[in-house]
Amino acid sequence: MDEFEVKARRMVALCMLGALLFNYPMLALFNVSATAFGIPVLYAYIFAAWSLLIACMALVVETGD
């Protein structure tokens, strides 16, 4: 397998992770009437998951095998 195929597989895996993180079961877990540092928990979760996906994508794209 060449480097392009490895990166493509990792990006597909990250896409599936993103679909899992932003789908109903996970969002329902964080849909509570509480706050984290003054921010609603659901919003904090969405921002943190989104940031995590971006960081992982950058890691996949920038690293060489």
Image: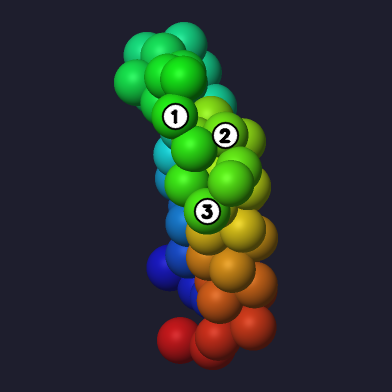
CA separation in Å, label 1 and label 3: 10 Å
Question: How far across and down, in percent of the image, does residue 1 sit?
Answer: 43, 68
Three-letter code, disc 1: Ala
Count of numbered circles in the view: 3
Question: How far across and down, in percent of the image, does residue 2 sit?
Answer: 51, 73
Three-letter code, disc 3: Phe
Q: Which residue is mark 2?
A: 40
The foreground one among 47 and 9 is: 47
Report the side of 8 relative to 29 (left or right): right
- Can residue 25 be seen from the camera position used here? yes
- Up the image or down, 43 lies above or below 22; here it is below
Q: Residue at x 54, y 88 (%)?
A: 64
Check disc 2 and report its element: helix, strand or loop.
Answer: strand
Check disc 3 and report its element: helix, strand or loop.
Answer: loop
Three-letter code, disc 2: Pro
Q: Which residue is mark 1?
A: 34
- Can residue 7 be seen from the camera position used here? no
Q: How is the image coloured?
A: rainbow
Residue placed farthest to the bottom in the image? 64
The foreground one among 41 and 3 is: 41
